[in-house]
Amino acid sequence: MASDERTFHIILDALSLKNLPRTGWGLRGAPRESVADHSFGVGVIALALARMEGLSRQDESELLRRALLHDLHEVRIGDLTPDQKKAIRPDEKGAETELLEGSHLEEELASLHSDRDVLGALSSNPGQVALLCNDADKLDMLFRAIEYANAGNQKMGEFLSSAMLQIKSSSGKKLAKLALARLRK
């Protein structure tokens, strides 16, 4: 049986993401953004992608839950850059399990873990849901990198190219193209 107290503590942990800065931006001299700021952006973009791709309401709901919780593990392991993740190899699944087990949110584990596995079958099209969640994540990074580049930060090239290489859906590519058109040369 799920514990109300356990759920309460997860909520407090999740809300602490408002105070956890994203590491990559800080290393490049960009204004600090919190993990929660990023998760909000990913959620809004995920909703737009779901509508653009014509997802069913079930798949849209799945996508939004994934987008909302996709970085929850960072409560335990912190926000790591890709290079740090390669060096440290954090146990994201273990952190998510530790956070959510025994709570009213425990059923979200399968969804979160399927993004890191061979994709589970919680939605009618899990591959597309995972792909769109990843695209929303990378689009949020792209939009912020363009914002920072347009404000004069010349260290955004790596973020721009990385995001463009990782966006896979046709709708994601359309949004990326529109965003890049706003990049001042």
Image (cartoon, rainbow, N blue to C red):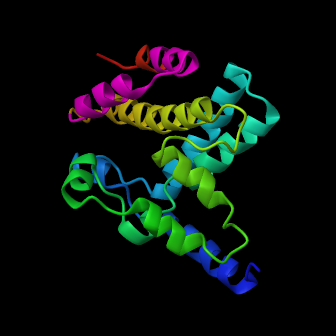
Q: Is 72 located above or below residue 126 in the figure?
A: below
* Residue 100 location (% of width, % of height): 60, 70
Q: Which residue is located at x 69 percent, y 45 percent?
A: 122
Q: Residue furthest bottom?
A: 5
Q: Residue furthest left?
A: 87
Magenta highlight: main SS: helix
Closer-to-camera residue (162/177): 162
Q: Quadrant of residue 20?
A: bottom left
Residue 172 is covered by the magenta coloring = yes
Q: What's the magenta region? A: 155-178
* Residue 143 location (% of width, % of height): 45, 32
Q: Which residue is located at x 35 percent, y 28 percent?
A: 150
* Residue 60 location (% of width, % of height): 73, 36
Q: Is 5 located above or below residue 133 in the figure?
A: below
Closer-to-camera residue (102/180): 102
Q: Is 100 located above or below residue 159 in the figure?
A: below
Closer-to-camera residue (61/173): 61
Q: Is 106 located above or below residue 61 in the figure?
A: below
Q: Is the N terminus in the top left, top right, bottom left or bottom right quadrant?
A: bottom right
Q: Which residue is located at x 46 percent, y 22 percent?
A: 168
Q: Is the C terminus in the top left, top right, bottom left or bottom right quadrant?
A: top left
Closer-to-camera residue (178/182): 178
Left or right placement of residue 169 versus residue 78 in this view: right
Left or right placement of residue 130 versus residue 125 in this view: left
Number of numbered discs visible in the structure rendering: 0
Q: Residue furthest right?
A: 57
Left or right placement of residue 117 versus residue 78 in this view: right
Residue 80 is covered by the magenta coloring = no
Q: Which residue is located at x 37 percent, y 23 percent?
A: 164
Question: In this orientation, does residue 161 appear?
Answer: yes
Question: In this orientation, does residue 19 appear?
Answer: no
